[in-house]
């Protein structure tokens, strides 16, 4: 499975009074990883939503916090497509310290594809090129 990685420098507003990143930001970082991934494969959110008329809501998210991230730390957000059947999609994530490679958090999100009316879409039928790319991302 191919791994897609982007880098994020922790901002002050992401932290609490102790300078530790608030737990809710890890889910935002997962989204940052997805945005990066979709751009890398040529299907940024803007294209999915405006051109293809697709949305991909989050059905489930899970994050396991391993060690703290502080204001000013730089982390790498790594994503891989764990599974894709054309209707549902699962991403897994690792957030690691950019310098030490220490694991800070890991988790996953599950998604589906809907059209503009909110109807479930099969990419295999509706968007075979995107279906193929996502399937290839899951292969070893």
Image (cartoon, rainbow, N blue to C red):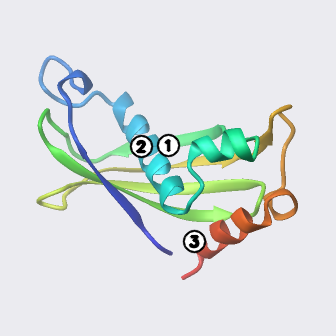
SS at mark 2 in the image: helix
Left or right: residue 56 compared with residue 93: right
Q: What residue is shown with label 3?
A: 137
Residue located beneath label 1 in the image: 62
How packed mark 2 is, by other alpha carbons closer than 10 Å (few <14, some 14-19, many 20 or more), is some
Label 2, label 3: how far apart the Cα atoms are: 18 Å
Q: CA distance from mark 3 to mark 1?
A: 21 Å
Residue at position x 57%, y 64% in the image:
82
- Could you say where residue 135 lies in the image, as x and y percent from the top left? 67, 71
Q: Secondary structure at mark 3?
A: helix
Residue 96: percent from the left, percent from the top? 25, 55
- Residue 100: percent from the left, percent from the top? 12, 60
Can see residue 56? no
Separation of marks 1 and 2 at Cα, in angstroms: 15 Å
Number of callouts: 3
Which residue corresponds to mark 2? Answer: 32
Does residue 78 appear to the left or right of 120 in the view shown?
left
Badge 1 marks a residue whose secondary structure is strand
Q: Quadrant of the C terminus?
A: bottom right
Task: Give me the residue at 82% from left, 64% from top.
Answer: 124
As drawn, the residue found furthest toward the bottom would be 140
On the image, the x and y values in percent for residue 5 come to 35, 60
Of tags 1 and 2, the one toward the viewer is 2
- Give neighbour class at mark 3: few <14, some 14-19, many 20+ (Cα, 10 Å): some
Look at the numbered discs 2 and 3 and tell me whether their residues touch, using CB distance below 8 Å.
no
Q: Earlier in the sequence, mark 2 or mark 3?
A: 2
Judge whether residue 22 can be spotted in this image. yes
């Amino acid at each position: 499975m191919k791994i897609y990685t982007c880098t994020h420098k922790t901002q002050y507003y992401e932290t609490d009074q102790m300078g530790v990143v608030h737990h809710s930001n890890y889910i935002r970082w997962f989204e940052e990883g997805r945005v990066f991934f979709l751009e890398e494969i040529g299907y940024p959110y803007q294209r999915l939503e405006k051109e293809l008329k697709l949305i991909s809501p989050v059905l489930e998210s899970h994050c396991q916090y391993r060690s703290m991230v502080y204001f000013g730390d730089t982390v790498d957000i790594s994503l891989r497509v764990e599974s894709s059947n054309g209707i549902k999609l699962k991403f897994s994530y690792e957030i690691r310290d950019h310098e030490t490679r220490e694991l800070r958090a890991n988790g996953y999100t599950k998604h589906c594809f809907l059209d503009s009316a909110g109807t479930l879409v099969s990419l295999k039928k509706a968007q075979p090129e995107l279906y193929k790319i996502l399937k290839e991302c899951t292969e070893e």
